[in-house]
Amino acid sequence: MVLIEKFVLPLLIDNFLTVVLIAGFGYLIYRNHFLAHVRTRKFKPPTPPPARRLQFTNREDGEEDQETCEPHLPADLEQIPFVHPRLSPEESQRRAHEFYQLMNKRRSVRFFSSDPVPRSVVDDVIRTAGTAPSGAHTEPWTFVAICEKDTKAQIRQIIEEEEEINYTKRMGAQWVRDLAGLRTNWVKEYLTEAPWLIVLFKQTYGITPDGRKKNHYYHEISAAISGGILLSAIHYAGLVTLTSTPLNCGPALRNILGRPANEKAMLVLPVGYPAKDATVPALKRKPLEEIMVTA
């Protein structure tokens, strides 16, 4: 210990800069030698993971990918010329405004006449709804048209039972207050008064002829678009309707109407003529500047 204190420590202190320089040079020599070794080594590239087939889906409602099937549309699908009349700007403006004026008169009606509506009219408004676009042209919708009184009565009973629970327990005080001005409650006379009920089901997946499941892409929005076109067609045909959402009634409706497990009820639409004493709330629609933004 005495030897270190007398000879080694003074030497280190006196030559500190020299020691630092020697250590630095030593590090540089080691680093250059290591890098040269790394450059000359031959590394084998990592083995890539095996290729796997990707299957895309929009995964609505948390669904899993369906079984792999043949493509819904053939890859060599024939492409045909698109024929569409080109209107003058003046004619386009006239038609657009005319259609707006027509649709602006559309209202949700809760009071129906029992006067019959021809089946052919119902067929055509549903045909029109079937022209809606859909993901990969899967057309994921089913329209069930009901005119049989007993079936309509069963549907009304199911919906009213659930709606009473909704209004008294599920919806909450604010929701009920927001609906008060519409004079609506859980009693749905229109479900049996209207000559027709149309129930729109979305098909969450398809089924091949051999029983396998297949993806239906964007089935929610596709079926919703078809429902919007159906509303327009009903109004254009001189009829009225009401968009009724069967909250918590889907499984029971599917059972009554004998629909398969891949279909879920979206809308129940009473369809017919308005009652002579029908009334509607005095509502106003938002002006264009509140619903449109240009960019």
Image (cartoon, rainbow, N blue to C red):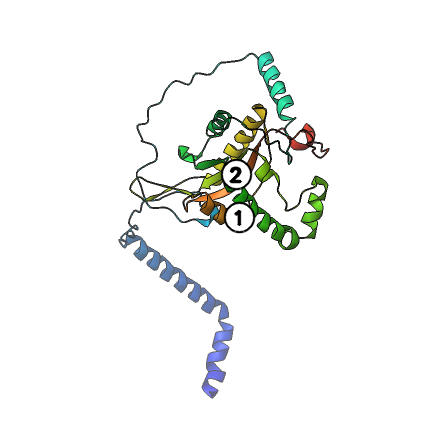
Crowd tier of the residue under label 2, counting other residues whose Cα lies within 10 Å: few below 14, some 14–19, many 20 or above: some
Camera-side residue of 247 and 104? 247
In the depicted structure, whether residue 80 falls above or below residue 54: above
Camera-side residue of 292 and 238? 238
In the depicted structure, whether residue 252 falls above or below residue 289: below
Secondary structure, mark 1, is loop
Camera-side residue of 268 and 131? 268
Q: Residue at x 53, y 29 (%)?
A: 229
In the image: residue 291, left or right of residue 64: right
Numbered label tally: 2
Pinpoint residue 293: horizontal percent, then vertical percent: 64, 30
Q: Nearer the viewer, mark 1 or mark 2?
A: 2
Q: Is residue 221 visible?
A: no
Q: Residue at x 28, y 49 (%)?
A: 50
Label 2, on which residue?
149
Camera-side residue of 45 and 156? 156
Q: Which mark is residue 249?
A: 1
Residue type at tag 2: Lys
Residue 29, image quadrant = bottom left
Pinpoint residue 269: horizontal percent, then vertical percent: 55, 36
Secondary structure, mark 2, is helix
Crowd tier of the residue under label 1, counting other residues whose Cα lies within 10 Å: few below 14, some 14–19, many 20 or above: some
